[in-house]
Amino acid sequence: MTELERSIAAYATFLDEQSLSRSPVPTRQSQPDSPPAEGEPTVVQIRTPDADTLPVEDEEQSRRGWLGYAMLAAAAVILALGAIVLTDDSEESAPVDAVADSDFAPTEADALATVEAYYTAFEAGDAAAIEAAFVEDYSGFFYQGEGHGPPGNLSDHIGNRIWDAARGTVLLDRTCTAGAGESTWIAVVCEYGLHRSVQQAVDAPATPITERITVTAQGIRTLSTREGPQEFPVDDLFEFWMWANHAEDAAAVSCCDGGGSIGDERSDGELRQQYAEQWAAFLGENGCTYETVGCAPSAAFEESDAFGTVEAYYTAFETGDADGIEALFVEDPPEGGFPFDELVRTSAWNAGQGSTMTDRACTESGSDPSGIMVVCQFELHEAVQDVAGAPGTVFHQTITLSADGIQTVDASWFEPGIQGDRAFRFWMLANHFEDADATDWDEDGSIEDARSSGEIRRQYAEQWGAYLEESGCTYDAIGC
Amino acid sequence: VIREQTPVSDVTETSERKAAFSSFAREVEPRLRRALVAAFGPEIGTDAAAEAMAIGWEQWTVVSSRSNPTGYLWGIGRNVAHKSFGGRRLFPSPDPKQEPWIEPALPAAVEDLTENQRAAVLLVHGFQWTYREVAEMLGVSKSTVQSHEERGMAKLRAALGVEQ
């Protein structure tokens, strides 16, 4: 064995010890009275009380990115998807003499009790009790749901739960199944319906949630959340109503800007709850339903106007006409959508590189007397895709309009994103390092700078396209 | 907490499922953890292994039906690790006074290897796995593992200025 190999072996041992030290040493003082009896049902249901008796939970506002901002959106998507965390310990984590003692492993009853304590604390908005349900050295991150931004730490998670509780979210029909014994951890999977205050207000269905939790004798080691589809976009409608009628508080009722205190999160949640009640009354007075149909805009607002405005917006966007875009917006656009200055620079950048939109189709997704929400789907073809023959990127863009014009423009894009972008970026770094960043618009730059960056991107994209053709490579770099 | 009676047939089925998973977990979890630690470091690797095993339990029917369930969980753990990086340092440097036999520059050099090179180098030379064992875990061929290992070792030698 060489010196290097000896060093690697020693380092591997060190890493293994570090890994094992992440597992809590089994020093639990209180053991369960008795393990589950043989033959006892192994699937244990934890049922929540009736909805009326329960506290709160979350809804989220989706931070939809906007469209051509390929790079920004890519980062956002990565961050949004990024997440989940976990931890746990292995059976090896305990000292040898303890490993043999199966009492140190949590029982199913222990694990379910820990999980139940967590949910009880969550529903009660009890920050200290939520924290106490986790292991002391919890250092993981939490997946906060797509559109919620980057993964948060335990402090963020607690703030999020407190915000949820404060706005009256209820966990419906919760069931938890424990399994995987004979280790120092037990996996618990819980399913429930997340009934947010806004959903309650209009009697809309709850959002299905699945949470995967690993529990050790010292508490919860990992927790990750998967949110199912929300059948009706009541959150979007509520936020639309907020921006149209209470713009001054619209940002405040959103969750968890990070760094806020528990008290801040609680008061934000309570504020949202108050507005949700006002919104429900508003819908009731106007004969609206959560299904987003049968709730017409006010007489001053013609639906055809909305679609005409949307069409004019896209025409201005495609040509990079910042003044034209601005003219279509309300005088003081709320902060809810894609920031206006970024919108116009993105437009200029796309126009500079000759991006095109195809297959655009727009439909109404909801309306109330404040105005209308229109969702448009289209394919965006950037220069890179254009030269490489790659498919366009499908975007779903939501535009909210009131009688005075466009209020907000948001967008989500579909995986797998801008095809060829990574290969192009790699080629730029390898061959034109000095200009690699010049092909993207600068956050601090002007609209004209953005247009110029787009033009540079087009020039290099065409060179890259020629390179692909000469070398027999493809945009996805396969076979190259 | 209300415990509801479960039909006997369900109990049997669940017990069998649990027994099968527990047996699998006992055998696989330590190896999976080491492999993920080798690729991502002790913090992220340990967490990723835990999450992968939890998913394994949740989706045991799917996992157990795979031709290489260990490799399948490696893939899950790997995805989890990528999602949870969060800018954290991957490979800690030990205190030279306590670990004098570890070359001080080794952690940084290991961190500079690719993910597969790290896994191959640390599993083969650190944990004494065979190429075949590493290949099974990573779901690749033996020759691929050998290639990762050789390239990784070459990079380490270059970074540390050693010939052997």
Image: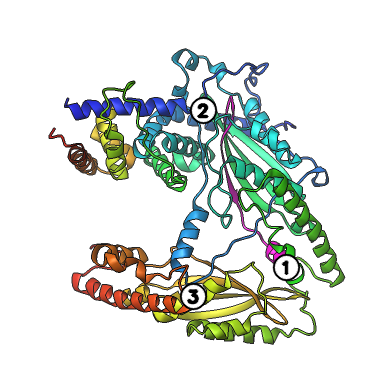
Mark 3–mark 1 contact, CB under 8 Å? no
The subunit carrying tag 1 is: A
Q: Secondary structure at mark 1?
A: helix
Query: Farthest top residue?
Result: A97
**Looking at numbered disc 1 in the image, what kind of residue is underneath it?**
Ala
**Looking at numbered disc 2 in the image, what kind of residue is underneath it?**
Ala
Q: Which residue is mark 3?
A: A345
Rendered image quadrant of residue A124: top right
How far is mark 3 from mark 1, CA to CA?
25 Å
Rendered image quadrant of residue A402: bottom right
The subunit carrying tag 2 is: B
**B85 or A453: nearer the viewer:** A453
Q: Quadrant of the N terminus of chain B?
A: top right
Query: Farthest right residue?
Result: A285
Residue at 62 percent of width and 29 percent of height: A111
**Looking at numbered disc 3 in the image, what kind of residue is underneath it?**
Arg
Location of residue A189 in the rendering, given as x and y in whole percent from the top left corner:
60, 39
